[in-house]
Image (spheres, rainbow, N blue to C red):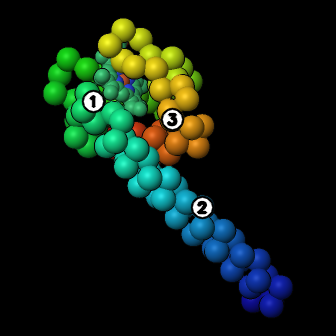
Amino acid sequence: MQKRNLGRVLAAVLLATVTHANAQDAAAIGEEIYEQHCQSCHGEKLRSAGAIPDLRDLGANDREKFDKMVMEGRGQMPAWQGVVSPLELDQLWAYVRSRAR
Ligand code: HEC
């Protein structure tokens, strides 16, 4: 392999590793935010006891619904606008997606 190509391959591998690590970090932080704000209603590790929606059932395309619900609330679901930052919302979503079923 030419030296120049090797450099490109290494850069690609490095980038993939960093991106993967970031997704894992986001989910790990999201888990902490979830435990702090959401777990009391939505259940430990997202396992709902029944009456409240189980967030593991959200699909990859439900991001908009998730954002709206978390920011605005509905009925017994509190609004988190001003409490959960946009970054924390991303991290919560990463956590929810990491445990999707
Ligand atoms: C006080 C209890 C309570 C807390 C705390 C709570 N939720 Fe909820 N959540 C609910 C209830 C009840 C609903 C169903 C509301 C409805 O549909 O009328 C709900 C619905 C949702 C939905 C919509 C799910 C769906 O499939 O329709 C999402 C997303 C959600 N909550 C995310 C969160 C997140 C993220 C947090 C933490 C930041 C959180 N909730 C904290 C009670 C709570």
- Please tell me whether mark 2 sits on a helix, a strand or a loop: helix
Residue type highlighted by circle 1: His
Q: Is mark 1 within 8 Å of ligand 1?
A: yes
Q: Position of residue 35 (x, y in %)?
A: 31, 43
- Please tell me whether mark 3 sits on a helix, a strand or a loop: loop
For label 2, the residue is 19
- Of 18 and 60, which appears nearest the observer? 18
- Please tell me whether mark 1 sits on a helix, a strand or a loop: helix
Q: Is residue 18 left or right of residue 40?
A: right
Q: Is mark 3 within 8 Å of ligand 1?
A: yes
Q: Position of residue 92 (x, y in %)?
A: 45, 41
Q: Quadrant of ligand 1?
A: top left
Q: Is residue 100 left or right of residue 62?
A: left
For label 1, the residue is 42
Residue type highlighted by circle 2: Thr
- Neighbour class for label 2 at 10 Å: few (<14), some, many (≥20)? few
First in residue order: circle 3 vs circle 2: 2
Marks 3 and 2 close (CB-CB < 8 Å): no
First in residue order: circle 2 vs circle 1: 2
Spatial distance from mark 3 to mark 2, Cα to Cα? 24 Å
For label 3, the residue is 84
Q: Is residue 16 left or right of residue 83?
A: right
Spatial distance from mark 1 to mark 3, Cα to Cα? 16 Å
| Quadrant in which residue 15 is drawn | bottom right
Q: Residue at x 45, y 16 (%)?
A: 73
Residue 38 visible, this orientation: yes
